[in-house]
Amino acid sequence: MMTADEIKQLIEAGLPEAQADVRGDDGQHFEATVVCAAFAGQSVIAQHRMVYQALGNRMGNEIHALALKTRAS
């Protein structure tokens, strides 16, 4: 199981300019708001893909569900 803090660290390491706020208490279902300059000019789908890429194979494995809100800084 993962913690919200671990997910925050993974997102911010994978997207160095990002600021992530991650919440979730059950170890599998999380909500994240991610603000990143790299999102500028990108579609919402592209922004979400960037976050999923930062999380790697943990999506669908350790992380069962992640509700995302993304925006450019």
Image (cartoon, rainbow, N blue to C red):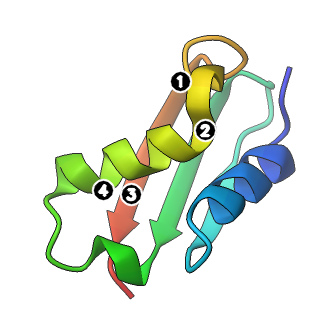
Residue displayed at 66% across by 23% down: 58
The answer for how far apart the CA atoms under marks 2 and 1 are is 12 Å
Residue 47 disc label: 4
The answer for how far apart the CA atoms under marks 1 and 4 are is 17 Å
Q: Is residue 71 above or below residue 45?
A: below
| Mark 2 surroundings: few (<14), some (14-19) or many (≥20) residues within 10 A | some
Which of 45/67 is in front?
Answer: 45
Which of 26/4 is in front?
Answer: 4
Give the residue number, with chain letter if any, for mark 1. 65
Residue 69 disc label: 3
- SS type, badge 4: helix
Where's residue 27, x and y in %?
80, 25
Look at the image and tell me in which quarter the C terminus lies.
Answer: bottom left
The answer for how far apart the CA atoms under marks 1 and 3 are is 13 Å
Where's residue 10, x and y in %?
72, 50
Q: Amino acid at mark 4?
A: Gln
Please tell me which of labels 1 and 4 falls first in the chain.
4
Residue displayed at 47% across by 39% down: 52
Please tell me which of labels 2 and 1 falls first in the chain.
2
Please tell me which of labels 3 and 2 falls first in the chain.
2
Give the residue number, with chain letter if any, for mark 2. 55
Q: Quadrant of residue 67?
A: top left
The answer for how far apart the CA atoms under marks 4 and 2 are is 13 Å
Please tell me which of labels 4 and 2 falls first in the chain.
4
Q: Amino acid at mark 2?
A: Leu
Is there CB contact under 8 Å for labels 1 and 3? no
